[in-house]
Image: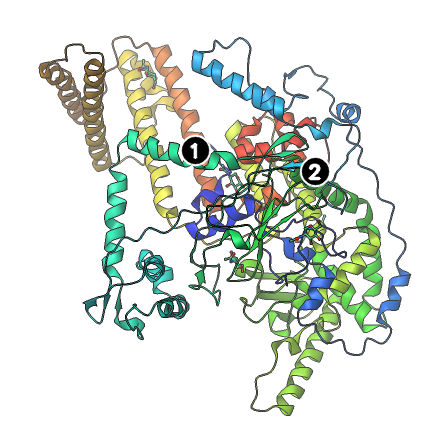
């Protein structure tokens, strides 16, 4: 049971976005803020949006200046206060060599728990020599071992070289096979209707119509913005081929015939046999195989998402103004590959050529292209488990730990600057306070075409209400259009400052209105921090520590809070499910802090219902078990612990449940019979006679009769082999299982509107979780799924007493 996989319940569209992040198809997220990143091809204008979860915080200054800049008013001597900042503390070298790590992970002295696990990487654990291996298990273990031999354990090396962050050389040899393109479109020929009549479309127009038709019954398909954007783009495609019918009205379009075709396809797909499904999967695997790995300095590394996203209609999160627009097919002519000079250039698909082949040794991307809807640059990187990603992750968390040592100085500085004469300094100090205390994003400029989302520097007057004496009420759309609503009591001086900035902003608004009574007023007029740009803020942060950004504050706060909460909540004596509940609660506190909210998953109520059913089914077993004990020894009837009734099992429910059990048993017997005969058929042995099935089913009828009788008598007949001891043993097992499922239910309910994955993946130092697991004897697999285990392999070396 993986309690952590909250993303599984996300609506598909969001899941896709998350997977996208996972795959690394995004800007690198740990690059320092000021220098223009080498990884970003400079000949593109990069929109102030990256698909990676948080890369916005780190938007380099130069890019920011590409966009509109908030007007600086009255910042007379604004740069001078940089001089007041003490030199950034010298960065401590990462010292994660082996001996140090060992020292940090002493085994517990009580000897209670000398597990093989402590210093071994996870992949080596869990393989007990004593376990007899079946031949397939042995094979699997062997493959695993071989794979492990290929893992580059960079964290065990003395010197940390090639950290992904700077513009140093990252590789001398880089080989890979490029990217996998989605298959070409194959027209289905199903005619949609226009004005009630079937129409014939060119393949390209049919393809785009089909994108919409597939979504006909979804919220997207019914969203007017989505419809409008789709329709506009579709008209352009229709005009490309003069043979296409003249279409002018969306209302006259009837996409249902295509939708129905897709529904039929779905049905057919469901009916495929196992073999057919396997064959499809094998074909897909074969197609993907060449792209799975890259070779970096002759080291085999998994590639992240090497698949070019197929064309489709853009969905976007929140009320994205571009929702429904056509995301065009990406052609090889748009894709640039990064390889070493001596590497073989992979052939482009037949009839095509690559946009460019480059040999950028400072870049860690393998391929890049520009997506047409947002104009975002997409990259193919190595997988999360790769050395580059791991190194940049580790560096990110080391940076956050470094901030731990600096934060009191930073706080002291901004606290005194809150009252500075200089307005910019005051604004900056106020923003710093919000970033530090509220874990807000820095926020950057956006083009008009993006959903209206803000971070700290782009807060406007209308986003904060003030309540005396010192409470701020925030309400704005943060990144990915997630609403941030929060009320906080702040320091008096912060309250005063915000009050002043808000009054100034409203005054500017009134003046602008006076000057252009009819025209629309630029919303930026009401910016609270009108003197402060994200770039200037980041520059200021960099004076404390290279690479310090709002994101480092978030990482620091998230990790710090998580560790503190974990320590507070975990109880050594608890069961593992209870410990996991504590873990998830600490994770939840962090997710709330980072505002990682989500809409309750669509199936949540049903899922909760199913869990309740499971609890009831277990209670039913417990009830039967108790009654059987009474049959064997009536004295237990008088012991309160055994005598209690299952209060929430109603008679009607019991009858229904038993009917279900009986039907299930019947199905099971029939299936077993069919399977046995299938096997015999293959082995050319004589088949079992139908009469045997009949006999087997008779036992079920008897079970039904017995249960019906037991319902009347209120007793239950124990198995012939049953003893009181065995039954009591079973009873206590049932108690445990019921408790575990109840904990799971609580966890799920508390998780309903919080996404744990993002903070776990991006903000919480994995070493905290791993040392917690070691300290409290919780298997690491309970807290990290497979992806995260691989991603955080480097963190496995910490011991139970490691501290963030
Ligand atoms: C455009 O940006 C949004 C974020 O606002 C993102 O969710 C989406 O994936 C981007 N679109 C494409 C086609 O990449
Ligand atoms: C983290 O943020 C919270 C506010 O959400 C704040 O109260 C707390 O002081 C911060 N903790 C650290 C360690 O920065
Ligand atoms: C105890 O539980 C196990 C598993 O649920 C079951 O197979 C067994 O028959 C039970 N023992 C008795 C004596 O009923
Ligand atoms: C593992 O968890 C992460 C974050 O919690 C999630 O994004 C990812 O999809 C999960 N992967 C798998 C294979 O379940
Ligand atoms: C897209 C692109 O060409 N990016 C970079 C690739 O590497 C060269 C240097 O080898 C850079 O100049 C490019 O900007």
Judge the density around disc 2: few (<14), some (14-19), many (≥20) Cα neighbours within 10 Å. many
Which picture quadrant has residue 489? bottom right
Task: Please say whether residue 84 is visible from this viewpoint.
Answer: yes
Percent position of residue 315, x then y: 44, 59
Q: Do the residues labelled 2 and 1 touch (CB within 8 Å)?
A: no
C-alpha span from label 2 to label 1? 31 Å
Q: Nearer the viewer, mark 2 or mark 1?
A: 1
Which picture quadrant has residue 712? top left
Percent position of residue 595, x then y: 58, 54
Please name the residue that numbered disc 1 is placed on. 286
Q: Which of 344 and 153 is in front in this view?
A: 344
Q: Which residue lies furthest to the left in this view?
A: 691
Q: Nearer the viewer, residue 123 or 434?
A: 123
Task: Please say whether residue 482 is visible from this viewpoint.
Answer: no
Q: On the picture, is 778 further left or further right than 263? A: right
Percent position of residue 700, x then y: 16, 21
Label 2 or label 1, whichever comes before in sequence order: 1
Res. 391 mark: 2
Q: Is mark 1 on a helix, strand or loop?
A: helix
Q: Quadrant of the C terminus?
A: top right
Percent position of residue 507, x then y: 68, 83
């Amino acid at each position: 049971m993986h309690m952590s996989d909250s993303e599984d319940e996300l609506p598909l569209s969001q899941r896709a976005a998350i997977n996208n992040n996972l795959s690394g198809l995004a800007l690198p997220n740990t690059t320092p803020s000021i220098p223009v990143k080498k990884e970003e091809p400079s000949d593109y204008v990069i929109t102030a949006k990256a698909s990676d979860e948080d890369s916005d915080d780190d938007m380099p200054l130069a890019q920011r200046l590409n966009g509109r800049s908030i007007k600086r008013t009255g910042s007379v001597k604004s740069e001078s206060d940089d001089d007041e900042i003490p030199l950034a503390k010298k960065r401590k070298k990462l010292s994660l060599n082996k001996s140090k790590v060992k020292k940090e992970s002493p085994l517990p002295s009580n000897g209670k728990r000398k597990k093989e696990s402590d210093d071994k990487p996870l992949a080596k654990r869990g393989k007990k020599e004593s376990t007899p291996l079946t031949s397939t298990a042995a094979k699997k273990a062997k493959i695993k071992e071989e794979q492990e031999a290929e893992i580059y354990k960079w964290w065990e090396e003395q010197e940390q070289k090639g950290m992904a962050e700077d513009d140093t050389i990252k590789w001398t040899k880089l080989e890979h096979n490029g990217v996998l393109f989605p298959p070409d479109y194959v027209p289905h020929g199903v005619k949609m209707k226009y004005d009630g009549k079937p129409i014939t479309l060119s393949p390209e127009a049919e393809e785009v119509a089909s994108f919409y038709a597939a979504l006909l019954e979804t919220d997207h398909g019914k969203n007017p913005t989505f419809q409008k954007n789709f329709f506009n783009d579709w008209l352009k495609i229709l005009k490309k081929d003069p043979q296409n019918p003249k279409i002018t009205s969306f209302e006259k379009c009837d996409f249902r015939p295509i939708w129905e075709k897709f529904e039929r396809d779905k049905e057919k797909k469901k009916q495929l046999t196992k073999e057919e499904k396997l064959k499809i999967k094998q074909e897909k695997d074969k197609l993907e195989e060449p792209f799975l790995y890259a070779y970096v300095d002759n080291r085999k590394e998994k590639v992240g998402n090497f698949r070019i996203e197929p064309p489709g209609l853009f969905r976007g999160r929140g009320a994205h103004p571009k929702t429904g627009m056509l995301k065009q097919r990406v052609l090889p002519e748009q894709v640039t590959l990064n390889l070493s000079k001596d590497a073989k250039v992979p052939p482009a698909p037949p009839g095509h050529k690559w946009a460019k082949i480059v040999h950028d040794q400072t870049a860690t991307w393998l391929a890049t292209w520009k997506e047409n809807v947002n104009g975002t640059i997409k990259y193919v990187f190595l997988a999360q488990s790769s050395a580059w990603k791991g190194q940049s992750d580790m560096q990110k968390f080391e940076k956050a730990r470094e901030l731990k040592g600096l934060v009191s100085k930073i706080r002291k500085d901004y606290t005194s600057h809150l009252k500075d004469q200089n307005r910019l300094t005051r604004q900056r100090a106020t923003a710093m306070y919000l970033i530090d205390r509220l874990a807000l994003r820095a926020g950057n400029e956006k083009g008009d075409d993006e959903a209206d989302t803000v971070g700290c520097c782009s807060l406007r007057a209308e986003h904060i209400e003030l309540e005396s004496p010192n409470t701020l009420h925030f309400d704005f759309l943060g990144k990915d259009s997630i609403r941030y609503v929060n009320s906080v009591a702040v320091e008096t001086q912060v309250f005063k400052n915000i009050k002043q900035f808000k009054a100034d902003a409203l005054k500017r608004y009134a003046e602008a209105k006076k000057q252009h009574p009819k025209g629309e007023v630029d919303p930026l007029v009401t910016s609270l921090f009108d003197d402060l740009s994200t770039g200037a803020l980041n520059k200021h942060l960099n004076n404390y520590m290279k690479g310090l950004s709002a994101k480092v504050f978030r990482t620091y706060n998230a990790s710090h809070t998580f560790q503190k909460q974990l320590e507070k909540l975990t109880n050594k004596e608890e069961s593992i499910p209870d410990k996991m509940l504590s873990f998830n609660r600490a994770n939840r506190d962090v997710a709330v802090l980072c505002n990682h909210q989500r809409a309750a998953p669509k199936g949540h109520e049903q899922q909760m219902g199913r869990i309740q059913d499971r609890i009831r089914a277990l209670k039913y077993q417990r009830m039967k078990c108790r009654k059987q004990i009474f049959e064997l020894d009536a004295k237990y009837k008088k012991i309160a612990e055994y005598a209690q009734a299952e209060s929430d099992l109603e008679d009607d429910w019991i009858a229904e449940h038993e009917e279900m059990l009986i039907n299930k048993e019947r199905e099971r017997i029939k299936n077993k019979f069919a399977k046995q005969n299938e096997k015999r058929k293959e082995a050319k042995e004589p088949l079992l006679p139908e009469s045997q099935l009949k006999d087997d089913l008779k036992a079920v009828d008897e079970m039904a009769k017995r249960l019906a009788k037991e319902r009347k008598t209120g007793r239950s007949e124990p198995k012939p082999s049953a003893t009181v001891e065995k039954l009591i043993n079973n009873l206590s097992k049932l108690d445990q299982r019921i408790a575990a499922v109840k904990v799971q239910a609580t966890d799920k309910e508390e998780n309903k509107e919080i996404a744990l994955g993002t903070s776990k993946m991006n903000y919480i130092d994995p070493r905290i979780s791993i040392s917690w697991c070691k300290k409290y004897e919780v298997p690491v697999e309970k807290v990290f799924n497979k992806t995260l285990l691989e991603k955080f392999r480097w963190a496995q070396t910490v011991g139970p007493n490691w501290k963030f």
